[in-house]
Image (spheres, grey):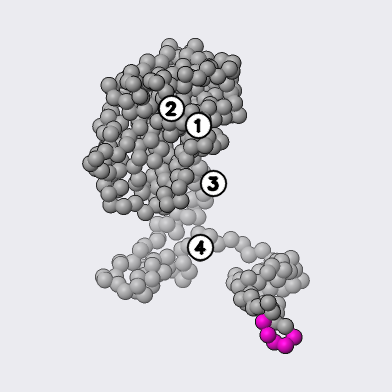
Amino acid sequence: MINHPCPDGIGPAPNPQLLSIVQHNCLGSWDVFLSLFESFREATTYLSLVFLQDPPVNKAHLPCFNGFKSFFPPVRKPRVVAYVQVSFLASFSVLPRFKGVDDILALDVSSQEPLFGTNFHSFRVINAYSTNTRDHRVHSVSPDTLFPTLDVPLLVVGDLNIHNPLSDPLQSCSPREIGSSTLYFEKAAVANFALLNLPGEYTRFPLVRKARPSVIDLAFANPLLLPLFKSCEVSLPSTGSDYVPITINLAPPTLIPSPRGPRWSDTDWETLSPLIKNFRIPPAPVCPSPADLDKWLAGSLIGSPPFSRSTPLSQDLLATPNPGGLPTRQPSVASSTKPQGWPGDTAPQPYGTWHTFPRWGTSRPLRPPRTNTGRLSC
């Protein structure tokens, strides 16, 4: 057991309107554990809950860090553990739930006041470390255990050791990997869980060359917790593990900025409405060739009788005044003379700017230098 000399609580002061949760795989290393908790001093948010997978264990004892209280399954060598800041326990009550196994832990967080401006007084976090078994189609933690149906907000975090295109779209997954991970993503979809990870943002960078980076540390939220989700980031420094610490931030819905979208109130509907009403798509050809399909798609923006148009609809929608009488076509990159229709006296700046840029399109491949005798120089 480690008794590290530091004051109670590290990092910023508690903020009841913002809750930050960290998950990380320690690889059973004490150095990784200490590096992770020491990095909390540089954190910009109050890290109240820390969920670890594969923590270091020595003679049935887990490491401790001043200012944190640990919760872990009552087994000789637990594979998951939760650390809660003591200052957080002054305002919230925490109740651990064990399932008699060493690779899953549930933590119920409750408060007398409603949480995050909602009607809920509690929420649950499930921490799991799912590993492969002899049967590659089954992992140590089943999908039904990870994604239960509850009437309170639920967050699921952990190292699930599954590879799927939904979490890692740029990776080429084998049929075996897709088959074993599909069970989890299908169960999550049926229970209306949402994946909080940014697809393609790696959570593990192997220390060996032959292994590939992957996204296997995953986080899911049920529909009741999803409105409280603010961000999922990897802002903490490296701990020496090949896993990246993940920080999940929760906040009241009123403090979460709304996602960007079209500004429909600024749209000129008076001009666009008749164009949209008169727009018709011609019937698609039967078994078209690639050329016929391109012709049909190009003609779809022009319209068909009795709504045929002399100009494409897209040109009408995007048409803007032409300042200075500039030509609608861009000058050729290879042109060395002033393009016709681009008057230098009315628009000298665009013409001069165009010819000051390097003409990358006409650059020739580099040739080896030659000597005066015509031979290649060494």
Three-letter code for the amino acid on which mark 4 is drawn: Asp
Give the answer, above or below, for where 125 lies relative to 131: above
Q: Which mark is residue 226?
A: none
Looking at the picture, tell me which residue is in the foreground, 261 or 166.
Answer: 166
Identify the amino acid type marked 1: Val
Residue underneath mark 3: 266
Is label 2 in contact with label 3 (beta carbons under 8 Å)? no
Given contact means CB atoms under 8 Å apart, are the residues at marks 2 and 1 in contact?
A: yes
Residue 144 x %, y % = 25, 32
Please state which of residues 213 and 76 is positioned toward the viewer in this rendering. 76
Q: Is residue 309 visible?
A: yes
What's the mark number on residue 316?
4
* Location of residue 315 with respect to 147 vertically, above or below: below
Q: Nearer the viewer, residue 186 or 351?
A: 186
Which numbered tag is attached to residue 32?
Answer: 1
Residue furthest toward the front? 59
x 35%, y 24%: residue: 77
Quick one: label 4 or label 1, which is nearer the N terminus?
1
Going 48% across and 37% down the picture, which residue do you hit? 241
**Between discs 3 and 4, the one toward the N terminus:** 3
Q: Secondary structure at mark 2?
A: loop
Amino acid type for the residue under numbered disc 3: Asp
Q: Which residues are magenta?
A: 372-376
